[in-house]
Amino acid sequence: MDRWQELEQRLFMRTFKRLPVTLVRGKGALVWDNEGKEYLDFVGGWAVNSLGHCHPVVTRAVKHQVGTLIQASSQFYTIPQVQLAELLVQKSCLDRVFFCNSGAEANEGAIKLARRYGKLYLKGAYKIITTYNSFHGRTLATVAATGQRKFQEPYIPLPNGFINADYNDIKAIKGATTAEVCAVMLEPVQGEGGVNIADTDYLPEVRAWCDEKGILLILDEIQTGVGRTGTLFAYEQFGIEPDIMTLAKGLGSGVPIGALLAKERVSVFSFGEHGSTFGGNPLACAAAFATLKFIIDNNIPDKVKRLEQYFMSQLTKLKQQFDFITDIRGRGLLIAVEFSDNIAEEITLACLKKGLLVNQVKPNALRFMPPLIITEREVDRALNILSEVLKEQKKEKL
Ligand SMILES: *Cc1c(COP(=O)(O)O)cnc(C)c1O
């Protein structure tokens, strides 16, 4: 343990079980620790570093903005946030935005907006249907929305107004819908829940049901948005449009920002009903504008789609080689490998030793969320390391 790690253990609340590595620098899909060791980064700051580490386009935009105007408050007009809003509205099916600082905060905004809509147009309906294995954040309301007991148990009683239904089960949503329900909130791919992908018909069925009942469809695209799944937004792949969408992780390529977007008729906040001190500050918005513009101008989503095919075909070969790989699944560069046993932690540590960063999403599953700008050669390099680790694992078992 180095001195930073020792200090951390003494100073920090014990919320994060960190891996034994202190990172100091990054470039593209590579990072280095404080001893100069190089790692290939397939964690990507948890699907945040969409353009990799310190992409020149982002660094330049931040450097410029940091010497121009960092914060002014929402009492005034500022330019970077309007530029970002214009691009988001142009490239999505939504009409209005609200900027904040994180995913949870974007979802809080979405929940408040849906409740506001319910009060105005649905006779006070305020409940929101969310799904099991979902993840919507760590604030009290978003923990209540998250359909996983382990995040909720320590904080019960939680704010009420959330009903859980099974994912990929339209009947469960129909069964949970009462006159008190104002919205359904879903991830197109459940990220933290283990990379569970919506079935082809599921989202269109949910959309049709919401239309029939006059309730709102909120898509939490905090992890799937901004090119991650091979289209700019994941909803595009399902042929539907949400009424409300939230973004965060990949939007600023590492600079914290969240966004709440909604259709015109659903944008029912009036002055003073919602707000944020830091939300929409010029620094974060300049980083996000540079990121989003680069992703659009360089057709990154198409590249992600091709990389998905390559990644999955190479993983298929691994699966044929190792019978304890029970499943591989993913959309774009959000990919999971599942094992028959709870070996994800050992494998994560062994990969770390060999210079590959991966994420343990479940005791028996790894998740890959590399920068969207990785190359096939970097995929090869990562999977070679993984393959070596799996070979050792196999030997141990025999
Ligand atoms: C990460 C995540 C969140 C929470 O975002 P924070 O920035 O950590 O608050 C919410 N929803 C989804 C789908 C996420 O992946």
Image (tube, grey):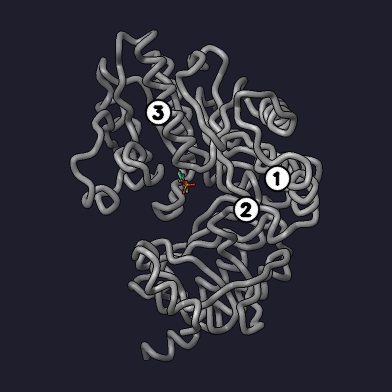
Along the polypeptide, which appears first: circle 1 or circle 2?
Answer: 2
Q: Position of residue 385 (x, y in %)?
A: 59, 80
- Looking at the image, do the residues carrying marks 1 and 2 touch, with CB atoms under 8 Å apart? yes
Residue that mark 3 sits on? 111
Along the polypeptide, which appears first: circle 3 or circle 1?
Answer: 3
Crowding near the residue tagged with mark 3, few <14, some 14–19, many ≥20 C-alpha atoms within 10 Å: many
Vertical relation: 351 (above or below) 111: below
In front of the other: 108 or 189: 108
Q: Secondary structure at mark 3?
A: helix
In front of the other: 208 or 226: 226
Vertical relation: 23 (above or below) 327: below
Give residue 355's quadrant in the image. bottom right
Vertical relation: 201 (above or below) 34: above
Residue that mark 1 sits on? 287
Give residue 25's quadrant in the image. bottom right
Residue 299 visible from this viewpoint: no
Which residue type does callout 3 highlight?
Answer: Ile
Give residue 96's quadrant in the image. top right
Instruction: Residue at 74% x, 47% y: name it.
Output: 66
Residue that mark 2 sits on? 254
Which residue type does callout 1 highlight?
Answer: Ala
Residue 206 visible from this viewpoint: yes
Q: Secondary structure at mark 1?
A: helix
Say which of marks 3 and 1 sits in front.
1
Along the polypeptide, which appears first: circle 3 or circle 2?
Answer: 3
Q: Is residue 63 left or right of residue 208?
A: right
Q: Position of residue 284 (x, y in %)?
A: 65, 42
